Image (cartoon, helix red, strand yellow):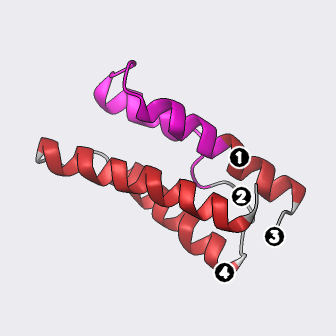
Amino acid sequence: MNKHKMLGLLLDVLDELRLIKGGRGENPLYSVISSYEEAVRNLEKDEFTENPIKNSPRVYLEIYSDYDHPLLQKMDYAQRQLNFFIVAGTRK
């Protein structure tokens, strides 16, 4: 996955997380949202040393226990793709 597609995926997940946060009127997703914001900043600057969104689906589930939410699959895909992006050094 190239940098542009990775950024789009991260922003898409981030938007959905913010919608969930807004719809529930609470902020327990702060740490998950912050990790995605950090990932976006790091991707824009090409400054990765680790994957800030690793385990984000697990953290989401610890907060909401909503195993059927379609966002979980997208979060899992994003964390795996970002890890590959970092390890492979893909910077296009």
Q: Which residue is painted at 15% across and 45% down in the image? A: 23
Label 4 sits on a secondary structure element that is helix
* Lower sequence index among marks 4 and 2: 4
Percent coordinates x, y for residue 31 in the rendering: 39, 52
Percent coordinates x, y for residue 22 in the rendering: 17, 51
* Lower sequence index among marks 1 and 3: 1
Residue that sits furthest to the right in the current view: 88
In the image, residue 54 above or below residue 40: above
Q: Which mark is residue 91?
A: 3
| Cα–Cα gap, marks 3 and 2 | 15 Å
Percent coordinates x, y for residue 48 in the rendering: 72, 67
Residue assigned mark 2: 50
Q: Is residue 75 magenta?
A: yes
- Magenta residues, as a range? 52-79
Would you call the spot at circle 3 few (<14 residues within 10 Å), some (14-19), or many (20 or more)?
A: few
Would you call the spot at circle 4 few (<14 residues within 10 Å), some (14-19), or many (20 or more)?
A: few
Residue that sits furthest to the left in the current view: 25
Amino acid marked by disc 2: Glu
Q: Which residue is painted at 71% across and 46% down in the image? A: 81
Label 2 sits on a secondary structure element that is loop
Amino acid marked by disc 1: Gln
Left or right, residue 34 beside residue 21? right
Residue assigned mark 4: 45
Q: Which residue is painted at 33% across and 21% down in the image? A: 65
Label 1 sits on a secondary structure element that is helix
* Lower sequence index among marks 2 and 1: 2
Left or right, residue 36 beside residue 22? right
| Cα–Cα gap, marks 2 and 1 | 13 Å
